[in-house]
Image: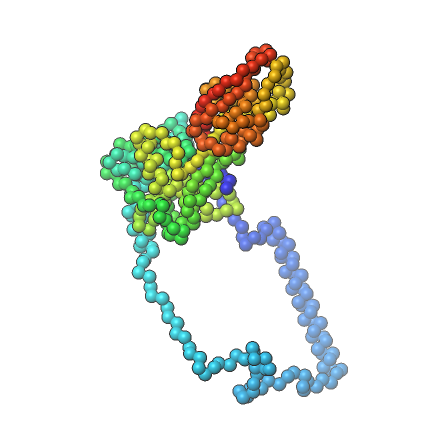
Amino acid sequence: MNGNFNNQTPQGNNGPDFSYNWNGSDNNNKNKGNGGKVIAIIAIVVGAILLTVLGVYLSQNMDFNLDGFFPTVSTDSSVDTSGDDPSLDFSRSPDMSVPEFSVAPDSNIDLSTALSAIYNECSPSCCTIRVSLNGRPYSIGSGFVIDAEGGYIATNHHVIETGDKITVAFYDGREYNAKIVGSDAVTDIAVLHIEAEGLKAVSFGDSGKIKIGESVVAIGTPYDETLAGTMTCGIVSGTAREVQITNEYGKVVKTMKLIQTDCSINPGNSGGPLIDMAGNVIGITSLKIADEQYEGIGFAIPITSAIEIFQKLIAGEAIGDSDIAVATPQIGITVYDVEDGLEVLRMNPRCEYPEGVIVSDIELNSSAYKAGLSRYDIITEFNGTEIKNRDDLTQALMKCRAGEKVKVTVFRFNRTLTSGEYETITFLLDAAQ
């Protein structure tokens, strides 16, 4: 599932760009439609005149006897009109009973009252996350209080990852400067801290027990702060959906396991709570399919898995593996099959060299580079798997996870390309970005 999953709202827009389609009509063809009406009217008038003339002519020149022209319809109820085919007998059998139909009693649940009660209970815990960069408004998102005494606020990583100042604004007008306690790009979860009293924390539900069809609501700040505190409602459309997240180049950087909902989730809703009918938070609204061909396909991070991430971020612990997301591992290198690479790189070794893949480029901030891997190295073995070509390296990498420690064997030429020697390099695999 591909698409634009950045659910932040850039500031500075004057308003949304709406596009209307009036019953599929094309406004450029409206004159053509009027011309068709004129032609139709002319045709009707001409036809009426011709029929009148024909009727006068026939009445004056022909003697018509219409007796017997139309069939006679009998009104005698004794006549059998069912015909010879028994399947056409619609008569009612004397022993047939007439069923009684009853209207279902009114539901004991007043949905409007229930939704209002949920909003009144949960909205004091919800807030707008305002992000500024270099003194200027950059984006907004949503969040909610997870610990009232500690002053901890949950939101999405992508809401706060770009900015140098964060403000938490509650719907009653209170505003606080916030600091980032911890943030994880893979799970897309962040925890903020504010110095405040009188906060109210949300209550957590069990996202592992939710079922498709259950009603849910989302509270947040879609599009603009003038819409802060907006609540939308829908249902759980799917559970444990595996969603592939891509970067701007279309490369899959991670796979997330999320709750699907048809609640209206718009830019600015990111980081807000997804709430069940008991008023418990079951998810963190995070993304939607941003494509005009699709509607009502939004996703939320399961809260049961998120709670563990909250605790680790607050404790300053490494996140590591989680049930929420698996990052696509990457080494940060560009490689060729050896013979092709030597030709592209215009290298002419004067010594024997092995099969494998040759590194033509390497990212300077990658773990592999920092561990000692360099350009022109020929990778012959990756984590115990013999490497003869790029497909071998791809398959071996797919068996690993981001953050996993791997061991790579390389053949390294000397500066004159007259000899070389094998080296073993160990490093942690980076997460794709």
Q: Residue furthest right?
A: 61
Q: Nearer the viewer, residue 45 or 75?
A: 75
Picture quarter containing residue 266? top left
Colour scheme in the image? rainbow
Q: Percent x, y for residue 175?
A: 30, 35
Picture quarter containing residue 258? top left
Q: Percent x, y for residue 76?
A: 55, 88
Q: Nearer the viewer, residue 426 or 234?
A: 426
Residue 387 lies left or right of residue 137; in this view the side is right
Picture quarter containing residue 166? top left
The structure residue drawn at horizontal position 54% and vertical position 50%, both measured from the top left corner, is: 21
Residue 135 lies left or right of residue 79; in this view the side is left
Residue 71 lies left or right of residue 223; in this view the side is right
The image shows residue 11, relative to residue 62, as above or below, that is: above
Q: Nearer the viewer, residue 54 or 209?
A: 209
Q: Would you say residue 264 is visible in this rendering?
A: no
The structure residue drawn at horizontal position 33% and vertical position 66%, both measured from the top left corner, is: 105
